[in-house]
Image: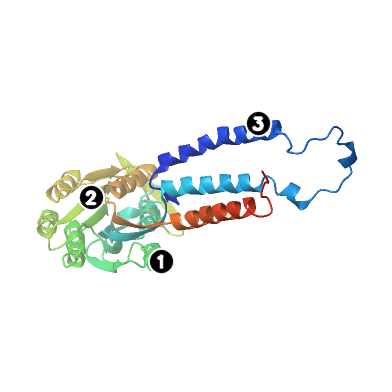
C-alpha cells in the first residue's frame, strides 16, 4: 500500500487537540437536572445509554481518520519483472600433456586445474560451457552445454594419456573455435591453459589466434607452472622417482595470442594464483542480466470513504434516537 498524497497524513496530528478539547469539555459539563444530594442514586443500575455516551465522538474520530486517508489517495501496487539473460559461450581448452603431472602445483598441475575449472563452471549457471583437451593433438571432450552437472563429471574424467603426447597449442585453439564460430551468443570466449611450448600440430598458435579473432572470439591464455624447475614423477620399477625438470612456457606466444584476440595472458605459479586467474576472468566475462520492471497501481480510497460514510450515518442515527438530548 502506497499513498499518492502522503503529506495529508500529517492532518492526523490535528485530531490530538480535538480529543483533548472533548475530554476537557466532558469533565466541565454539568447535568441538566441538578439535585442537592445524589447519594440516593449511587446504587441505581446504569442504563445501557451510559455506555453509549462517547460512541458518537469515537465514530466521528474514525470518520475523520478515514476521510484523511481518502485525501492521501491510498493505492495498491502490483509489480513484476521481465528478465532477459544474455549468456556467454565459453570453451575451456586444457593441456593434458604428461608435463601436466609436474607437482609444483598440488597435487599436480592437472588436478589443480581440474579443481579450479570445476569451481569456475559451477559459478556460471547461465552460460554454455564446453571442454577441449589437447596434447600432441586435440579433440572436444564436451561440446557447449548448460548441463553443468554432466560438465563437472567430464572435468573429473580428464587425464593425461588420453591422446598422443606433445603440445599442440594451435590445434587446441582451433578445435575450440570450431565449437564457437557458429554460436549466436554476443560474447564468445576461449580459456586456454598450458604449461609448455607449441611443438606439434598442423596449425600454428598465431594462425589459430587470427582465426579466433575473425569470429569475434577472445582467447584468454594461462601459463601454468612455477618459475625455474618443477618436480616431475618418473616411474622406476615399482617406485616413483622425482626429477626436477625445467619449466618452459612460451609466454611470448601466449601473450601475443591474448592481445590479438583482445584478451589477457596470465601466469599461474601456484594453486592460489591459478584460482585468482580464473576469478579474474570470471569478473571480466560476466553474464548480462537485463531486468525490466513493471508496476500497476489501483486506487483503494473507496473502502475508506465507505467506512467514513457509515460512521457519520451511525453517529447521526444515535444522536437523533437513543442518545437524543432534550432541550
Residue highlighted by disc 2: 221
Q: CA distance from mark 1 to mark 2?
A: 25 Å
Q: Is residue 70 rendered to the left or right of residue 86?
A: right
Identify the image quadrant of residue 16.
top right
Q: What residue would you read off at disc 1? A: 149
SS class of the residue under badge 1?
helix
Mark 3 crowd level (few <14, some 14–19, many ≥20, 10 Å Cα): few
Sooner in the amino-acid sequence: mark 3 or mark 1: 3
- Find out whether the residues at labels 2 and 3 contact each other: C-beta distance under 8 Å: no
Q: Is residue 42 visible?
A: no
Image position of 154 (left or right of 94): right
Give the colouring mode of the picture.
rainbow
- Between the C-alphas of marks 3 and 1, the distance is 76 Å
| Numbered disc 3: secondary structure | helix
Left or right: where does residue 59 sit relative to residue 77?
Answer: right
- Please report contact status of discs 3 and 1: CB closer than 8 Å, yes or no: no
Q: Nearer the viewer, mark 1 or mark 2?
A: 1
Q: Which residue is mark 3?
A: 24
Amino acid at each position: 500500500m502506497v499513498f499518492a498524497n502522503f503529506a495529508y497524513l500529517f492532518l492526523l496530528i490535528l485530531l490530538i487537540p480535538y480529543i483533548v478539547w472533548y475530554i476537557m469539555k466532558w469533565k466541565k459539563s454539568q447535568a441538566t437536572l441538578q439535585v442537592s444530594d445524589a447519594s440516593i442514586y449511587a446504587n441505581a443500575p446504569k442504563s445501557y445509554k451510559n455506555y453509549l455516551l462517547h460512541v458518537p465522538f469515537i465514530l466521528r474520530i474514525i470518520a475523520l481518520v478515514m476521510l484523511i486517508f481518502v485525501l492521501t489517495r491510498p493505492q495498491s501496487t502490483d509489480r513484476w519483472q521481465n528478465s532477459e539473460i544474455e549468456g556467454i559461450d565459453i570453451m575451456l581448452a586444457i593441456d593434458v600433456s604428461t608435463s601436466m603431472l609436474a607437482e609444483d602445483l598440488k597435487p599436480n598441475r592437472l588436478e589443480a586445474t581440474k579443481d579450479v575449472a570445476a569451481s569456475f563452471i559451477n559459478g556460471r549457471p547461465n552460460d554454455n560451457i564446453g571442454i577441449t583437451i589437447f596434447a600432441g593433438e586435440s579433440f572436444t571432450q564436451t561440446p557447449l552445454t548448460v548441463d553443468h552437472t554432466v560438465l563437472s563429471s567430464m572435468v573429473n574424467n580428464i587425464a593425461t594419456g588420453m591422446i598422443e603426447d606433445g603440445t599442440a597449442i594451435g590445434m587446441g585453439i582451433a578445435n575450440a573455435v570450431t565449437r564457437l564460430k557458429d554460436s549466436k551468443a554476443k560474447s564468445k570466449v576461449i580459456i586456454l591453459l598450458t604449461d609448455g611450448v607449441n611443438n606439434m600440430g598442423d596449425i600454428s598458435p598465431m594462425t589459430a589466434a587470427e582465426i579466433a579473432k575473425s569470429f569475434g572470439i577472445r582467447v584468454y591464455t594461462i601459463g601454468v607452472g612455477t618459475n625455474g624447475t618443477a618436480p616431475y614423477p618418473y616411474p622406476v620399477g615399482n617406485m616413483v622417482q622425482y626429477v626436477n625438470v625445467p619449466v618452459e612456457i612460451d609466454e611470448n606466444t601466449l601473450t601475443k595470442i591474448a592481445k590479438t584476440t583482445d584478451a589477457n595472458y596470465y601466469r599461474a605459479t601456484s594453486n592460489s594464483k591459478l584460482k585468482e586467474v580464473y576469478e579474474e576472468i570470471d569478473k571480466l566475462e560476466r553474464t548480462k542480466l537485463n531486468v525490466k520492471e513493471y508496476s500497476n497501481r489501483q486506487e483503494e480510497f473507496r473502502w475508506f470513504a465507505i467506512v467514513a460514510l457509515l460512521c457519520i450515518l451511525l453517529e447521526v442515527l444515535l444522536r437523533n434516537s437513543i442518545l437524543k438530548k432534550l432541550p
